Structure formats: C-alpha cells, structure tokens
C-alpha cells in the first residue's frame, strides 16, 4: 500500500500531480518489483500556448485542465481532462507537450533509483497448469466459444448464461480427465481462452459479439418530460444501458460550500451545479446491502459533472442538481449519464450553450513477439464498448464532447502504456461517435 500524506500546501500549486510523482519515486526506491517509473504533469492552455504545471491562478483562465501520466518511452498510462469544448487539435498539442515534460520527471526518478534504490525482491512465480491441460481446454471449448461469440442475437443475460454454462461444462470435462486440476485453474484457463478467442474474432473479422462493426454504436432511445411535477427529466438508453436523469432547481443559498482545507487543496469554494450518480444493485441484477456511495459512484458522478458543467450558464439564477440513476447497466453508464443529464437540463429549460454526449472507446492489442519490450504490434479500437468489452479489452477511454470539442476525458489502461498514436486515433473515433449521438439526441 502506498500512502501520500499532504504535509504542507502553499495554496498556489495543486498537490495531486505531486502525489503521483512522489508515489512513483517511493516505489522506485523500494524493493517492490514494478514496471515504473511513471511521471505525471498537469497541462493548461491559454492564448495558443501549453502551460506545464500551471498555478491555480493560471488555471482560472485556462481552456484545458489535463492531468497526464506516462511511463518510460512516452507511453500514456493515465489521462484525465476537463475543459471548455477543447478541439482535438488543441488536445493533441497538450498531450505532446505533456509527454515531453513527463519524460523529464521519469529521467530524474530513474537516476535517483540508480543511485540509491534498493535491490528488487524476487517475485513469487505462480504455478500454472501444464500445457497439456491448457491444450485440452482449448480443444474442448474453443469452437463452442466462437459459436457463442458469433450468435449476435443474444442479449446480455442470455449471453452470460451461455458462457457460464460452457465454463461449467468445460470444468467438469477437464476434471474428469485430470482429477488433480482445481476448479480455479480450469476457470483461469477458460477465461484466458475466452479473451484470446474474442480478440481473434475482432482482428480477423472486424465484427463484435453483438454483431456491430468496430466503429458502430449501440441502438439509442431518448425520452424527455417523463414526470410532469419535476423541473426536468430524461431517460437515455444505449443498448442495455439505461439511465434516468432528473433536474431540480433551488435557490442560490442551496449551493454547496467547501470547507477551508478543501479550498486549499484545489476544490471550488462554491458549487451551484451538482450531479449525483447512483448505481443501485438491481441495475446489473445483483443484491447487496444498503451502503454509502463508493469510490466508483463518486468517480463516475464527478466525471459526468465535469462533462456537463461547461455548458451550464455561470449566471443561471438557481442552484442546479442533476440526479442520474442507472436502471440497467451493460457498460459506460457514466457516459450515458452525460447524455441523459444533457437532455434533462434542456427539458428543464436551462439555456445550455449546446448539448453534450458521452461515449467510451475500447482497445484490443497484439504485442510484439518479444514480450520484454511491451511494444504494441497491432491494435483495434472499439467504439461504444459494452461491459464485456471493457472486461476483455486493454483500455477504457471515456469521452464527453459537444459538436465543437471535448468537455471531459478519462483514460485508464490495462497494459503498460499507450502510444500517442493510439490515444489520438481514439480521440478522433470518440469525437465522431459523440457527434453521431448528438444528432440522435437533438
């Protein structure tokens, strides 16, 4: 566990980026094996120029608030942005400058590691089933998996049931032949086979398990003014992800006020636009005890709020609260909240500058034969990923955009890092998808 304790704050610079670099340095100096170092920077943009690690005062007038982390070789490991309809060209410039600045931090941490870092402890090698067992799993389940993946008419529940039944059938068959192999080992082999077969399908056919092409979005349905007593309401459905958004007005006195410590660490003094995201257990057919909002709900709500804030007039005479409740989930519910929230704001009569849409872009990769260099040999981008594609893929890149430019981004990846080429192509794909969704919404 890495803990970053804020010991002092000057009120001029935000400490979040510093914490990322401090954690990177601590891991490099420790005996813990990892693939670092990483370096992180914040990038602002004003008057046609990129600003690396701007002060808070500079950020007040910046069109972009981009936080970017990268690994050795300029591979992007994390990216988060909010901005005022940032064009893809401006964003590309910010990413390029950010990668250059992050590399300088990486070089300093790497030098510090070489001078005073501890020797890394040996890694415990996990024991895996023999190649014979893996081959038997592939022989038994490979064609059956491809048959399920090519059955494009299955909905989420039916698809999950088919895969679950095949997993149990495979486990029973393998344990009958190899009694010493555990259920967990067979299921791990099955999951690995499932992942590789779906990737094979994407690379060879360009067709996804639900029948879509790589750049296609799921069917979309929109409704507004569902509840007459409410100030505004909208239902947004994309595939089997469905979100209900409502808008409530209150007086200016109902605005959220941050405490003094929060203000010092980067939070706004006052918030008159708020979005709350709720992900109840029934939306993905589960049962759980009542609980407070977790990190996932808070993070998704914060992202959707950032995406919508730029289109809300700063002089609107009321405090606005948007509630986004996920009724059904099969991937990208946070971006569905952006779409539904935008519709609900317009239904409530808020004079928004323009509507915003959100979409998530995924990725599958093929690596170089020499796995030690972690270089991507080939890749495919997936527009509007479902929950399965998020689980099986290498990237979840959430994007919110108007017709003119991006208002919010959030990128996380499961591989060691993404090249600028992949990220910029994904941005172009996402921007096109958002414009397509906006045509449906309006």
Image: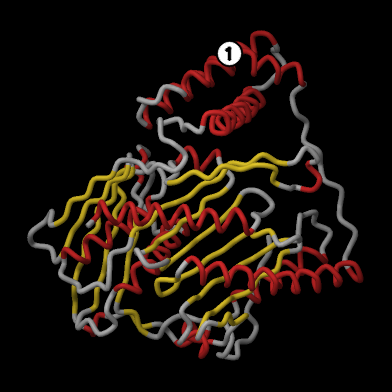
Q: Residue furthest left?
A: 228
Residue 182 in picture, x, y percent from top left: 67, 22
How many residues crowd around disc 1 within 10 Å: few (fewer than 14), some, or many (20 or more)? some
- Where residue 82 sits, quadrant-wise, is bottom left
In the rendered structure, the answer to whether residue 150 lies left or right of residue 318 reads right
Q: Looking at this view, is 158 or 69 the one in front?
A: 69
Residue at screen point 72% across, 61% down:
71
In the picture of the structure, the residue carrying the numbered disc 1 is 172
- Where residue 253 sits, quadrant-wise, is bottom left
Display coloring: secondary structure
Give the number of callouts: 1
Residue 431, above or below 389: below
Question: Looking at the rendering, in which quadrant would you find the C terminus?
Answer: bottom left
Residue 62, above or below 40: below
Residue 429 in picture, x, y percent from top left: 47, 52
In the rendered structure, the answer to whether residue 168 lies left or right of residue 154 reads right
Residue 326, above or below 159: below
In the rendered structure, the answer to whether residue 110 lies left or right of residue 70 reads right
Question: Looking at the rendering, in which quadrant would you find the N terminus?
Answer: bottom right
Residue at screen point 51% across, 33% down:
206
Q: Residue furthest top?
A: 177
- Where residue 100 sits, quadrant-wise, is bottom right
Which structural element holds mark 1? helix
Residue at screen point 20% across, 80% down:
318
Residue 55, above or below 377: below
Residue 299 in picture, x, y percent from top left: 45, 62
Residue 368 in picture, x, y percent from top left: 75, 41
Q: Looking at this view, is 377 or 174 the one in front?
A: 377
């Amino acid at each position: 566990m890495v803990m970053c304790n804020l010991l002092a704050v000057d009120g001029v610079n935000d400490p979040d980026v510093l914490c990322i670099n401090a954690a990177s340095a601590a891991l490099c100096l420790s005996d813990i094996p990892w693939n670092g170092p990483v370096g992180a920077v914040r990038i602002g943009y004003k008057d046609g120029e990129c600003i690396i690690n701007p002060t808070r005062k500079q950020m007040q007038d910046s069109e972009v608030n981009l936080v970017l982390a990268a690994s050795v070789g300029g591979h992007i490991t994390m990216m988060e942005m909010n901005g005022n309809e940032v064009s893809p060209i401006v964003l590309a410039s910010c990413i390029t400058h950010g990668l250059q600045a992050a590399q300088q931090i990486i070089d300093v941490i790497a030098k510090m590691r070489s001078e005073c870092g501890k020797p890394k402890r040996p890694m415990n090698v996990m024991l895996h089933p023999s190649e014979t067992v893996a081959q038997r799993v592939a022989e038994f389940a490979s064609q059956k998996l491809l048959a399920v993946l090519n059955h494009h008419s299955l909905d989420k529940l039916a698809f999950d049931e088919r895969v679950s039944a095949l997993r149990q059938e495979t486990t029973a068959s393998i344990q009958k032949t190899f009694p010493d192999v555990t259920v967990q080992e067979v299921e791990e082999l099955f999951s690995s086979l499932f992942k590789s077969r779906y990737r094979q399908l994407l690379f060879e056919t360009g067709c996804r398990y639900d029948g879509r092409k790589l750049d296609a979005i799921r069917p979309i349905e929109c409704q507004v003014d569902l509840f007459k007593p409410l100030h505004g309401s909208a239902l947004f459905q994309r595939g089997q992800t469905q979100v209900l958004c409502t808008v409530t007005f209150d007086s200016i006195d109902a605005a959220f006020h941050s405490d003094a410590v929060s203000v010092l660490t980067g939070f706004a003094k006052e918030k008159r636009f708020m979005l709350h995201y709720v992900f109840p257990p029934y939306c993905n057919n589960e049962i759980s005890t009542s609980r407070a909002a977790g990190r996932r709900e808070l993070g998704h709500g914060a992202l959707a709020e950032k995406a919508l804030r730029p289109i809300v007039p700063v002089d609107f005479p009321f405090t606005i609260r948007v509630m986004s409740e996920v009724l059904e989930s099969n991937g990208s519910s946070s971006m569905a909240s952006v779409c539904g929230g935008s519709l609900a704001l317009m239904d409530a009569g808020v004079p928004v500058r323009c509507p915003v849409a959100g979409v998530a872009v995924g990725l599958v990769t093929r690596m170089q034969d020499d796995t030690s260099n972690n270089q991507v040999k080939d890749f495919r981008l997936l527009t509007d990923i479902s929950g399965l594609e998020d689980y099986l893929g290498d990237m979840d890149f959430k994007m919110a955009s108007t017709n003119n430019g991006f208002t919010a981004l959030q990128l996380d990846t499961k591989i060691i890092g993404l090249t600028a080429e992949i990220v910029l192509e994904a941005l172009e794909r996402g921007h096109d998808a958002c414009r397509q969704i906006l045509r449906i919404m309006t």
